[in-house]
Structures are given as C-alpha cells and as structure tokens.
C-alpha cells in the first residue's frame, strides 16, 4: 500500500512463481480443504490468560468465537513501542466505519487499496470479514489512545493467497494503512509493523512466519517491512498488482 506509513494492500488472490526459492504451482485448493484445516486447528489461548496450574480449555467444550482462527486478536492487549503504547482493537462497524472510510478516501491510500467512495464501499469490504469465520480480523491500530491506523490480521494459509506461494500451516498475514498524513514518513510504520509481527508471534505459538504482500511499486512500504525485520521472499503476480512477498520468520526473530 502507500508509503511504509500509508498502507499494505488488502486483497490477495494471486498467481506467482517461486517463493522462498521453491517453484510455486498454481494450486487450486478446494474450499473443503480449507474448512478441514480450520476444523483441525488447535486453539491455544495466550499464556497470559492461563493461570498457574491451569490447563488450556478443551477445544471440544470451549465456546468458539470468530477470533478463534487467530487466537483472539482482541485479547492480545497493548504493547509498548518506541512511539508509545499501541493496541489492536477489532473493528466495530457502527463505531468505526466513518473513520475508516475517510482514510480510504485519502488519495495516497486509495491508490493502493482502491476503496475510495461512499461509506458503503468500505462497508462492503469490512462486512465479509466481520461476518466470516474469523480467518481475517479487521482492527483499528490505537496509539496512545488515538485510532491512527487500520490493520487486517489474517490466516494466510486459509486465504486465496495460499494457492500461489508455498504456504505452511498457521502462516499469518498482515495488511496495514496509516490513516493520518501527520503519521506518515517518519518511521512510524516500521515500528508498528515490528510490534504487530511480534504480537502475532507471541500469541500464535503455532505460527512460524508472518507474511505481507505490498504492491511492488510501493517502495516506501517495502522498505518499511525490510526495516521491521521482514525479508523479501519473491515477486508474486496477484490479480490486482505485482506484489512483494515479505516474510518475517520466527527463527530469525532475534537477529532481524
């Protein structure tokens, strides 16, 4: 999406060749397989929510919430960054639609997200995620109590993107846009990308990689991911863009 700070693209059906040095087949995985993967996933609650000596709730008896495919994003809590205390807050349509729609109509954002127009356009993008099975969770990024960015945390291995790169179970993707012009171009995107990737790795122990696919033309965005500890993995052809597949590996977390 726009500059490091402005955003990271939001859709993701793609057609690519070669990621992580491996040949990529244009695999058309059936929806039934995605459903099976979702049913078999182990839901591990964040350690902070498990008391001493307690066992994680049994999957068969626990209530299933829409966030379960991502480990309850709304319960991840705040994290401290160089810019201040930051938290992902799941979107509530009645509260957040006007703000997100206004951001989507910023020309710098609209150039990559392509959601400019009346609020109904943004609502049509948000509602399938909010009404879905929890494989994508739209969030506001709140910094020092102020909503200033929009995020999507999604299961890349259950997304159409998985048909076009060598996906692994529990791969988790992120999309980002920074809403206010005042917050762009000063390295804030890098700090927040690193913080959110850390949140994913901290709260999703089965996830070995955090992914993103910014528009390859969006040099500032790609640069922000690199500065945040992601590595460039491949160029991928998506229906609406040529993207840079960016990967942050759990195994390299301490050195990047």
Image: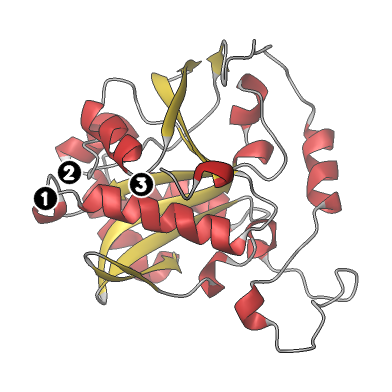
Would you place residue 234 above or below residue 7 in this image?
above
- Whether residue 224 is visible here, answered yes or no, is yes
Label 3 vs 1, first from the N-terminus: 3
Task: Locate residue 251 relative to residue 225 in the image: left or right.
Answer: right
Q: Which residue is mark 1?
A: 181
Gap between marks 1 and 2, in whole Å? 9 Å
SS state under label 2: loop
Pick whichever, 111 or 25, lies toward us: 25
Are there few (<14), some (14-19), or many (20+) residues within 10 Å of tag 3? many
- The residue sitting at the right extreme is 60
Q: How is the image coloured?
A: secondary structure
Q: Residues within 10 Å of mark 2 (few under 14, many from 20)?
A: some
Q: CA distance from mark 3 to mark 1?
A: 14 Å
Q: Quadrant of the C terminus?
A: top left
Residue pointed to by mark 3: 176
Q: CA distance from mark 2 to mark 3?
A: 14 Å
Q: Earlier in the sequence, mark 1 or mark 2?
A: 2
Picture disc at residue 239: none
Q: Residue at x 80, y 53 (%)?
A: 41
Which of 221 and 252 lies nearest the eye of the viewer?
A: 252
* Total numbered labels placed on residues in the image: 3
């Amino acid at each position: 999406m726009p500059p490091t700070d402005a955003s990271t693209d939001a859709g993701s059906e793609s057609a690519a060749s070669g990621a992580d040095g491996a040949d990529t087949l244009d695999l058309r995985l059936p929806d039934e397989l995605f459903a099976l993967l979702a049913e078999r996933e182990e839901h591990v609650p964040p350690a902070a929510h498990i008391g001493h000596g307690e066992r994680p709730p049994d999957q068969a008896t626990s209530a299933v919430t829409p966030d379960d495919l991502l480990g309850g994003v709304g319960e991840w809590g705040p994290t401290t960054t160089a810019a201040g205390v930051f938290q992902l807050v799941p979107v509530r349509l009645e509260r957040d639609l006007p703000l997100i729609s206004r951001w989507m109509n910023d020309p710098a954002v609209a150039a990559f997200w392509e959601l400019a127009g009346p609020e109904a356009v943004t609502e049509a993008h948000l509602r399938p995620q909010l009404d879905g099975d929890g494989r994508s969770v739209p969030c506001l990024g709140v910094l020092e109590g102020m909503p200033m960015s929009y995020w999507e945390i999604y299961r890349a291995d259950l997304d159409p993107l998985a048909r076009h790169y060598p996906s692994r179970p529990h791969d988790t993707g992120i999309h980002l846009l920074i809403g206010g012009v005042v917050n762009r171009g000063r390295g804030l995107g890098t700090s927040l990308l690193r913080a959110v990737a850390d949140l994913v790795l901290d709260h999703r122990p089965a996830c070995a990689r955090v992914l993103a696919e910014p528009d390859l033309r969006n040099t500032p965005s790609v640069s922000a991911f690199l500065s945040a500890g992601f590595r460039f993995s491949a160029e991928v052809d998506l229906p609406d863009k040529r993207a840079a597949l960016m990967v942050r590996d759990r195994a390299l977390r301490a050195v990047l």
